[in-house]
Amino acid sequence: MVSPTMAPYYYSSVDGDPHFMIAVPQKKDALCFNINEEPGVVLNLIRDPVTGVTVNGQLIGDKKSINNVKPQNTYFGKFGITTMNRNVRLEITTQNIILQNGMKRRVFSWFHEVGLQHSGLTLMIKRKQSVEVSMDNGAKFIVVLHQVWKHPVHQDFLGFYMMDSHRLSEQTHGLLGNTKMLF
């Protein structure tokens, strides 16, 4: 699992309720913010028209409780990663990982331990922990599974870490897009 102490300062991430941390390597600092949206909302995290990489995330909410009077917490429950230049789509949920290349589709569960290379994409599934996705352009993403066991309100959710963001083009945008334009 990735933690801030293990990762270099130039990574950006979204985890928790969604709490965003965007690296600003030029300043050796980070920009942090939260987004409050409803469950079901899809957020565009990364879109790089040069490399064809797009990452979207869909929010899920806490399980409803009978006396819940405060606003519902939201988390990421699904990430979609596409590489349009290679026609590869990856869907990661709290239940499974789906890899689709054109018409060919492979489904893995979080109980698998998998390492494979497929059309410019390397996929490493660490059983019940994380999925590491490396692109042929050098960009790397890690999706972490957070499991919540038998809790009356909370449910399993995902975290997303973008490593080596400098491998994406200067035309990259989205909530975790290119920070070269920030300062």
Image (cartoon, rainbow, N blue to C red):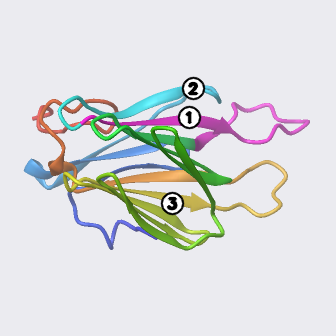
Determine whether, in the image, residue 28 is placed left or right of residue 123: left
The magenta region covers 52-77
Q: Name the amino acid type tagged 1.
A: Gln
Residue 57, x across and y down, in percent: 50, 37
Residue 103, x across and y down, in percent: 51, 38
Q: Is residue 69 magenta?
A: yes
Say if mark 1 contacts mark 2, CB within 8 Å. yes
Mark 3 element type: strand
Question: Alpha-carbon distance for marks 1 and 2?
Answer: 6 Å
Q: Quadrant of residue 67?
A: top right
Q: Nearer the viewer, residue 51 or 144?
A: 51
Determine whether, in the image, residue 169 is placed left or right of residue 162: left
Q: Which mark is residue 41?
A: 2
Q: Name the amino acid type tagged 3.
A: Val
Q: Quadrant of residue 85?
A: top left
Query: What residue would you read off at disc 1?
Result: 58
Tell me the residue at 79%/48% (across/down): 153
Query: What residue would you read off at disc 3?
Result: 144
| Above/below status of 63 relative to 171 | below
Q: Is residue 144 magenta?
A: no
Q: Residue furthest front?
A: 103
Residue 82, x across and y down, in percent: 39, 39
Mark 1 element type: strand
